[in-house]
Image: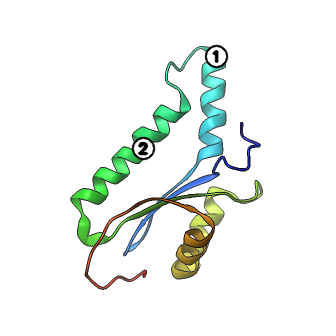
Amino acid sequence: MLEDAYYPRFLAFWSNEGLESIIDLHFLAKTNMWDILKGKDDSPMATRVSAIMRGMMLRARFNPQRKYEMYVFNSDDEIAEQDVIDAFEASPQTMVDTIRRIGQKIYVSGSKSKSVIE
């Protein structure tokens, strides 16, 4: 399952003020698999990810002025969560443009206010 090219590596969530969250979905899947094998986790990985996404979308709906976006995207296994965070800090607009180009849009909230990240 993790080797599937269509299984996204990261879930990214940002607003017009910058990166809010980056989640390594492969790590979540591996963690959940070990928990299931050990008999410590009753919920499937998809339920955990959807709960995280629902929380992010709820945050976005209650803060429409921040113009949130949520995308999933693939990357090489050598790229860690911290690498993505560092790249966002160094050049947020470049990262946003790249993720929009290579990723799959999950959620985008609207706002007419001027954004720091367009």
Q: CA distance from mark 2 to mark 1?
A: 23 Å
Say above or below: 49 vs 81: above
Q: Looking at this view, is 63 or 31 the one in front?
A: 63
Out of 111 and 12, give the one closest to the viewer.
111
Residue 114 point in image, percent of width and height: 30, 85
For disc 2, the marked residue is: 52
Residue at horizontal 30%, vertical 59%? 60
Which residue is depicted at the point 62% across and 57% down? Answer: 81
Residue that label 1 marks: 38
- Position of residue 4 relative to residue 118, above or below, is above
Three-letter amino acid code at the position of disc 1: Lys
Q: Position of residue 90 (x, y in %)?
A: 58, 79
Q: Residues within 10 Å of mark 1 (few under 14, many from 20)?
A: few
In the picture provided, is 20 more to the left or to the right than 92?
A: left
What's the image's color scheme?
rainbow
Which amino acid type is marked by label 2?
Ile
Q: In the rendered view of the protein, which quadrant contains the N terminus?
A: top right
Secondary structure beneath disc 1? helix
Q: Are marks 2 and 1 in contact (CB under 8 Å)?
A: no
Image: 117 above or below 15? below
Q: Position of residue 83 (x, y in %)?
A: 65, 65
**Whole-percent x and y of residue 88?**
55, 73
Instruction: Assign the C terminus to one quadrant of the image.
Output: bottom left
Res 97 → quadrant: bottom right
Seen at 62% across and 33% down, the residue is 31
Q: Is residue 84 left or right of residue 58?
A: right
Query: Residue at left 32%, top 65%?
Result: 109
* Viewer-nearest of discs 2 and 1: 2
